[in-house]
Image: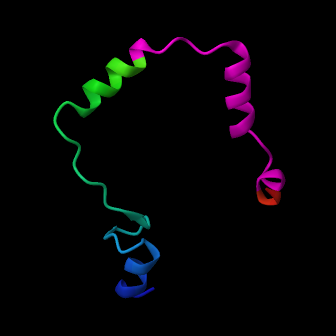
């Protein structure tokens, strides 16, 4: 790919290295502290919620491709 097609493929964002991912902007001060506070306040997941999340990430590739 050329630099021009890389930029188009990434929606105009600048690509970093060969990973093909756009560069991430800097986080504002206190960003991760705020995320930690929000996560700490959230109720724990139930066993059913954990099972649903686990199943979503452990699907065979054929099922993912069909979706």
In the image, taking residue 67 as reference, residue 37 lies left or right, namely left
Give the x, y percent position of residue 22.
37, 63
* Nearer to me, 39 or 60: 39
Give the x, y percent position of residue 41.
41, 13
In the image, taking residue 20 as reference, residue 53 lies left or right, namely right
Q: Magenta stretch: residue 62 in it?
A: yes
Q: Is residue 41 above or below residue 54?
A: above
Quadrant in which the N terminus appears: bottom left
**Chosen colour scheme:** rainbow
Q: Residue at x 77, y 53 (%)?
A: 64
Give the x, y percent position of residue 23.
31, 61
* Nearer to me, 57 or 36: 36
Outermost residue on the left side: it is 29
Quadrant in which the C terminus appears: bottom right
Q: Residue at x 34, y 22 (%)?
A: 36
Q: Is residue 36 above or below residue 14?
A: above
Q: Magenta stretch: residue 65 in it?
A: no
* Magenta residues (range): 40-64
Q: Residue at x 67, y 30 (%)?
A: 53
């Amino acid at each position: 790919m050329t630099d021009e097609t890389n930029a188009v493929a990434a929606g105009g964002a600048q690509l970093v290295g060969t990973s093909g991912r756009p560069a991430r902007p800097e986080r504002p001060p206190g960003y991760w502290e705020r995320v930690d506070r929000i996560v700490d306040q959230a109720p724990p997941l139930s066993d059913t919620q954990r099972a649903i999340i686990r199943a979503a990430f452990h699907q065979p590739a054929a099922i993912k491709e069909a979706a």
